[in-house]
Amino acid sequence: MSTEVTLKKLADMLNLSISTVSRALKDHPDISTDTKIKVKELAAVLDYEPNTYAINLRTNHSKEFGVIVPGIANDFYQAFISSLEEDARQYGFSLIIMQSGDDPLIELENVKRCKQNRMAGLFVSITSKTVDIHNFLKLDEQHIPVIFFDKVPAFEACNKVCVADSKAATMAAEALVLKRKKNILSLFGNAQLSITQRRFESFKQAFIKYGADSNLLIFNTHSSLEALEITTTQLLLNKQIDAIFCMNDEILIGAMKAVQKLGLRIPTDIGIIAISEGIIPQLYYPEITYVETSGFKLAKMAFARMLACLAGSSYVQELKIDSIVVDGGSL
Amino acid sequence: MSTEVTLKKLADMLNLSISTVSRALKDHPDISTDTKIKVKELAAVLDYEPNTYAINLRTNHSKEFGVIVPGIANDFYQAFISSLEEDARQYGFSLIIMQSGDDPLIELENVKRCKQNRMAGLFVSITSKTVDIHNFLKLDEQHIPVIFFDKVPAFEACNKVCVADSKAATMAAEALVLKRKKNILSLFGNAQLSITQRRFESFKQAFIKYGADSNLLIFNTHSSLEALEITTTQLLLNKQIDAIFCMNDEILIGAMKAVQKLGLRIPTDIGIIAISEGIIPQLYYPEITYVETSGFKLAKMAFARMLACLAGSSYVQELKIDSIVVDGGSL
DNA sequence: TTGAAAGCGCTAACAG
DNA sequence: CTGTTAGCGCTTTCAA
């Protein structure tokens, strides 16, 4: 399209060279105030907009961050991305969102896209089956910082920010001990995942630490529906149960359905506490007491770390954000 | 970085010209099978990846779609974006997500970013205060198709895909008539929004059409909390109320809290129906019956329309997706 | 204080 | 079948 306003066009119209116009536009000290004004005025009138691709080609990097998550349909990632986008925008960066669908192959494909597009940096929450971190580390070598968040690789030296999983579970346990709950239906997620293992260990340890004689009925569940079923069965079988602990939102949803189905009153008939991003617990009355794992806060931290890396911080870091207990009156 | 693999590098190593390598890589018929194989092999070995910026600069357009929404923290946009991303990926496109925060100024800034980045196309759900569509239409002139979805401009000729608002409200009303509900607490959103007005009109008309003698208690509410308060008050004041209609998820959340607070049983004590994306209604037991407004389906349609525009379809179109009633047992 | 010129990596007409 | 060449729009030495 010949209507495109370019540096050349401005230069021609002003009888200046392209380089002068370029420099004027970015306030290069060499250029006289006079020309600067003239150039800027014309640029404004013609609504000149620099061609991003030319710049990127020239400078060999872009102002785009890639974000790879298993799927965005999740309150936690939602909050994370939403918050990250705001921060990024402030700094002139855009976000490219990619979903791996928890499939390592698609994840790899996405990583390649990021590399090919010379992204400025990458935020990744890996799939549950990702074993080979190699491809990510290659990016780091090319000076494309990779910040892992939430689901992070277990051992490798890399930049990670995540919620304090163990701590969150401990806090939930402490709340239960404090309320002297004796028979606790404890619902955990997929036992294969390290997040489940960490939360489980800390949860158990906390009761031991405080010398509580609570009886823990522990189950692992892989879906909301399964949580609903387990909870229903257990509550019917065991009338002693006086509290439910849910390791995540998905489980909470199932457990709450069971509680509603059985017509139990919270917190009189039964207490409940969860680890959650915070959206779901607020949907019920009374609101569910939860240990917060804030995607919002995590995004702030991840972005700060990214800026540091971009600014040249070369060492890797493993950061954890602390949780807080948000009392909804359900315990 | 000198380790970057470029066409030139491949050409030098193979003693071929850059153009031959380029053509071999894209299976140009002019090139001999022999050279093609040689070139492709080396490219594979060296992990050659074309420089996107050079291509974009050359061809003056990218494989990126901009997506501008008021905010992504919303089940509907969530579903929309998630679905759109999958489709886009299949076709080699990426998604740049931008949030306007329902602020027309940020929206405008984002539109400019899209223009500046020569996006391949744009999906927009406008802010509630957007009046000037001019800037969007300018993009269309530059052959950057703009597909408005969900929140679309009222009058202008442009590509729009949205849920059939009136139809959804009519369907909800029909369900209520069918169940012979007589005193219906009818909760609508912000009365200033055209979506509210359309849903309200159709809702009312449906009762008239069927000659139902139902008594509608109509309220407009702007938040979940307000919905909770109104519902609580009304249910206490008027024991005749036998059903609640909620125009959207936000209102449903508030109404459900009130119902839980008052300890009412669904559907025996009271019936409830909502217009929703579908996530929230499934959180309760029994699940809430709702008229579906699917972000997923809308995305499919929007993407198809985008492809058509990219393929040269120049006329504008206004598309609507129909809703279905999903019975959760709450009515 | 300004301009000329080279080149980022790629594509595509044109020429052999 | 392959090579030469001329850019795409911009930045950045180097010269003037």
Image (cartoon, coloured by chain):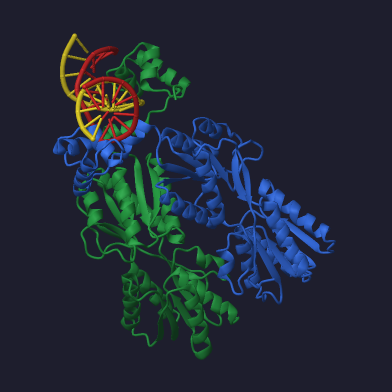
Chain colours: A blue, B green, C yellow, D red
Which residue occupies the foreground of this view, B173 or A106? A106
| Displayed quadrant of residue A224 | bottom right
Q: Quadrant of the N terminus of chain A?
A: top left
In the image, residue A44 lies at what x, y percent? 22, 48
Identify the residue at image location x=57%, y=31%. Answer: A134
In the image, residue B284 lies at what x, y percent? 56, 69
Left or right: residue B104 compared with residue A251: left
Q: Quadrant of the C terminus of chain A?
A: bottom right
In the image, residue A49 lies at what x, y percent? 26, 44
In the image, residue B95 lies at what x, y percent? 39, 46
The answer to whether A23 is drawn above or below residue A250 in the figure is above
The answer to whether B97 is drawn above or below residue B259 in the figure is above
Question: Disc count in the image?
Answer: 0
From this viewpoint, is residue B239 visible? no
Identify the residue at image location x=54%, y=69%. Answer: B287
From this viewpoint, is residue A321 visible? yes
The answer to whether B253 is drawn above or below residue A74 in the figure is below
Which residue occupies the foreground of this view, B31 or B208? B31
Which residue occupies the foreground of this view, B287 or A281? A281
Identify the residue at image location x=47%, y=79%. Answer: B244
Left or right: residue B91 compared with residue B242: left
Identify the residue at image location x=78%, y=61%. Answer: A216
